[in-house]
Amino acid sequence: MDYCRISSDKINELWELQKAYKNEIGEDAPSEQDMKALGKAIEREVIEFYGAFDGDKLAGCCSVTKGFSTFNYAVSGVFEDFYITPKYRHSGIARELVSYAYAESKVGSLTVGCADCDVKMYEAIGFSISLGNMLAYE
């Protein structure tokens, strides 16, 4: 498996994983307009995507959205968009992909917000420090 940052020229491969993820969790498929917005965000480096490639096939991806933390006065990252295609699950690439994304993004800290049912999965791939609760503003 090869790991690399995904640039906007690989948007079609990334888009296929985005649609598969939304389908798997029972959400509506993203629109063509959503794809264009994602491509622009990648080009502007608002979000960074990292992928696990089996040859030319994108087997999994994740993203890191960067911010700045006054906890350690350094760049911080939020881990999102994590998806491994079913064929490649339970093969160890998830942990490798997270490790690669953390190193390559050069963030001082990397956090993830998740539902209670997903905590064990995120712990299994390396997220081990509990920081309490995460809430969303409506």
Image (cartoon, rainbow, N blue to C red):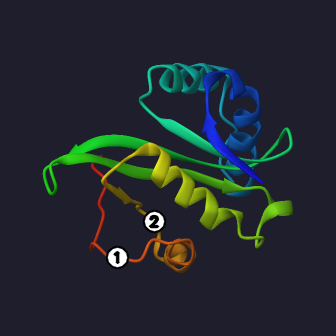
Q: In the rendered image of this protein, does residue 31 appear above or below residue 85?
A: above
The amino acid sitting under disc 1 is Ile
Which numbered mark, 1 or 2, is in the foreground of this view?
Answer: 1
Circle 2: element type: loop
Q: Position of residue 32 (x, y in %)?
A: 68, 21
Side of 62 relative to 106 (left or right): right
Tell me where residue 31 sits by quadrant.
top right
Side of 108 relative to 98 (left or right): left
Q: Position of residue 82 (x, y in %)?
A: 59, 54
Tell me where residue 71 sits by quadrant.
bottom left
Q: Position of residue 126 (x, y in %)?
A: 50, 72
Side of 85 relative to 120 (left or right): right
The residue located at (45%, 65%) in the rendering is 114
Label 2 belongs to which residue?
Answer: 114
Q: Which quadrant does the N terminus fall into?
A: bottom right
Crowd tier of the residue under label 1, counting other residues whose Cα lies within 10 Å: few below 14, some 14–19, many 20 or above: few
Label 1 belongs to which residue?
Answer: 129
Does label 1 or label 2 sit earlier along the sequence? Answer: 2
The amino acid sitting under disc 2 is Cys
The residue located at (76%, 34%) in the rendering is 13
Circle 1: element type: loop
Q: Position of residue 84 (x, y in %)?
A: 72, 57
